[in-house]
Image (cartoon, helix red, strand yellow):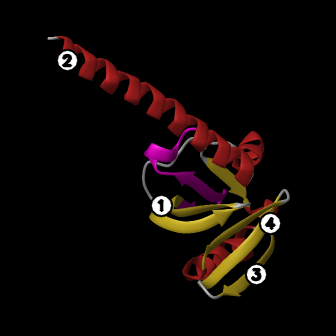
């Protein structure tokens, strides 16, 4: 009986410690990447549909490999992350007028489209460059 209770306590302790560490890591990544800064300016409600999922990208200093969600509308570019990584990462709606220095970037890992938003560099897969350019030319 004591062994079973001890195992339950160990499991409960692990869940608590893991949850605290996960939360801290998610908030730290959001802060280091510049996402928190962008959220202070461009926070919105997450899209329920009409977005690309599993997007690889880079926001500031942080890589978001396969966890980004990306959407485009006449209002701007939507960015948010999968629910498991949401802590500290509010959904963003960045107006088209705020996207600066939009350009193609090449690296050994592939081609990307880069832009700056209020001092934070955002890199997205090049396959979205055409869509991004279309919206930029139509709404700026």
Q: Residue at x 55, y 82 (%)?
A: 127
Q: Is residue 50 above or below residue 16?
A: below
Among the two numbered marks 2 and 4 on one chain, the one whose residue lies closer to the N terminus: 2
Q: Earlier in the sequence, mark 4 or mark 1?
A: 1
Residue neighbourhood size for the residue with mark 3, other residues' Cα within 10 Å, grouped as few (<14), some (14–19), many (≥20): some
Name above or below for residue 99 compared with residue 94: below
Is 55 magenta? The answer is no
Task: Name the spot of residue 3 as percent of width and height, x first.
Answer: 19, 17
Q: CA distance from mark 1 to mark 2?
A: 49 Å
Label 3 or label 1, whichever comes before in sequence order: 1
**From this viewpoint, is residue 90 visible?**
no
* Contact check, label 1 and label 2, Cβ < 8 Å: no
Q: Measuring from the top left, give residue 80's x and y in whole percent.
A: 56, 52
Rendered location of residue 66, percent (x, y): 47, 64
Whole-number angstrom distance, CA of label 3 to CA of label 2: 61 Å
Q: CA distance from mark 4 to mark 1?
A: 21 Å
Q: Nearer the viewer, mark 2 or mark 4?
A: 2
The residue beneath circle 4 is 116
Report the disc number at residue 3. 2
Farthest left residue in view: 1
Q: CA distance from mark 4 to mark 3?
A: 10 Å
Q: Nearer the viewer, mark 4 or mark 1?
A: 4
Q: Which residues are magenta?
A: 70-87
Give the class, few, some or many, for how many residues have Cα within 10 Å of label 4's Cα (few <14, many ≥20).
Answer: some
Q: What residue would you read off at disc 1?
A: 51
Q: Which residue is mark 3?
A: 103
Q: Tell me the SS state at disc 3.
A: strand
């Amino acid at each position: 009986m004591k062994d079973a209770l001890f195992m339950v306590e160990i499991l409960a302790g692990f869940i608590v410690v893991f949850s605290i560490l996960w939360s801290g890591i998610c908030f730290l990544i959001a802060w280091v990447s510049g996402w928190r800064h962008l959220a202070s300016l461009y926070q919105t409600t997450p899209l329920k549909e009409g977005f690309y999922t599993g997007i690889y990208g880079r926001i500031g200093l942080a890589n978001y490999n396969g966890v980004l969600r990306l959407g485009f509308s006449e209002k701007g570019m939507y960015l948010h992350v999968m629910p498991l990584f949401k802590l500290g990462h509010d959904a963003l709606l960045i107006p088209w007028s705020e996207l600066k220095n939009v350009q193609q970037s090449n690296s050994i890992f592939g081609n990307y489209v880069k832009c700056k938003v209020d001092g934070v560099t955002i890199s997205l897969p090049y396959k979205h460059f055409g869509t991004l350019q279309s919206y930029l030319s139509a709404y700026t």
